[in-house]
Image (spheres, rainbow, N blue to C red):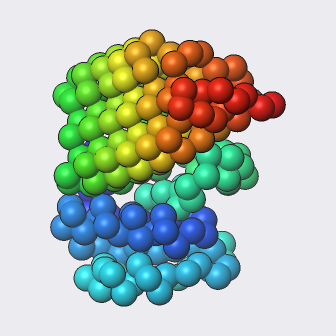
Amino acid sequence: MNNMGLNDIYILGLNENVITMICDNLHSQNFNAKVSVWNNEPKLEYAAYTHPEIDLEVVTGELDFEKLSVFLGVYKAKTKMDLFQNINVPAENFINIIHKNSEISKTASFGMGNLINAHVVITGHSKIGNFVSLNRSTSIGHHSVIGDFCTINPGVTICGYVEMGEGTTIGAGATVVDGVRIGKNVTVGAGSLVLKDLPDNCIALGSPINTIKY
């Protein structure tokens, strides 16, 4: 489970689906401490219903985040970036939440604040940055580099030697072939086939990619 340990966790942000995914991953690791969601009106009903074994609570008001184990409970790349830039939490306080059924090579590496869901495969010598979300059944090929704040949706295949800039989102079921470089803040549509490099700040669609918008 990397650095998660068995300490209480504080989740920042408001996204019920992400909170539920977090609880799925915690349950797979037999987590038995408390999960506190910090926001004015967090929605916890579904997460609490599906995981009654996890002690979920809502907290409001000021918290001393410098002394807490913290996770960004949002999914969209830009939202994660904005939230991180507006809070004052030491980098070492952010934890990785990893599903027990993921497969991560011993030669792969990753930073802090990552959400790695069930049936994710990260192969040899890959590098995952900070605050990356890898949804279920995603495959990261060997020697690939995934930048900070990237969001990769379910069923995506990233082949070997791919480089992806920070803040990029890959839609569900997309495939990125070997050696492709994807810039920063790029959105790749669901089901797309990426056969060539993509520049920063674009939206790319098609199988293969046939539309690029800026």
What's the residue at 43%, 58% (across, down)?
Answer: 69
Q: Residue 48: give x, y in percent of width and height.
A: 39, 84
Percent x, y of residue 50: 33, 81
**In the figure, residue 4 lies in which quadrant?**
bottom left
Name the quadrant of the C terminus.
Answer: top right
Residue sticking out furthest to the right: 214
Position in image of residue 107 (x %, y %): 23, 23
Q: Is residue 55 above or below residue 3?
A: below
Q: Is residue 135 visible?
A: yes
Viewer-proximal residue, 37 or 93? Answer: 37
Q: Is residue 105 above or below residue 36?
A: above
Left or right placement of residue 170 versus residue 55 in this view? right
Question: Looking at this view, is 86 or 105 the one in front?
Answer: 105
Q: Is residue 104 above or below residue 210?
A: below
Q: Residue at x 25, y 82 (%)?
A: 53
Q: Nearer the viewer, residue 214 or 92?
A: 214
Residue appearing at x 69%, y 20% in the figure: 199
The reply to whether residue 134 is in sight is no
The residue depicted at 41 percent of the width and 71 percent of the height is 20
Count of labels in the image: 0
* Vertical relation: 27 (above or below) 184: below
**Residue 17 or 211: which is nearer the viewer?**
211
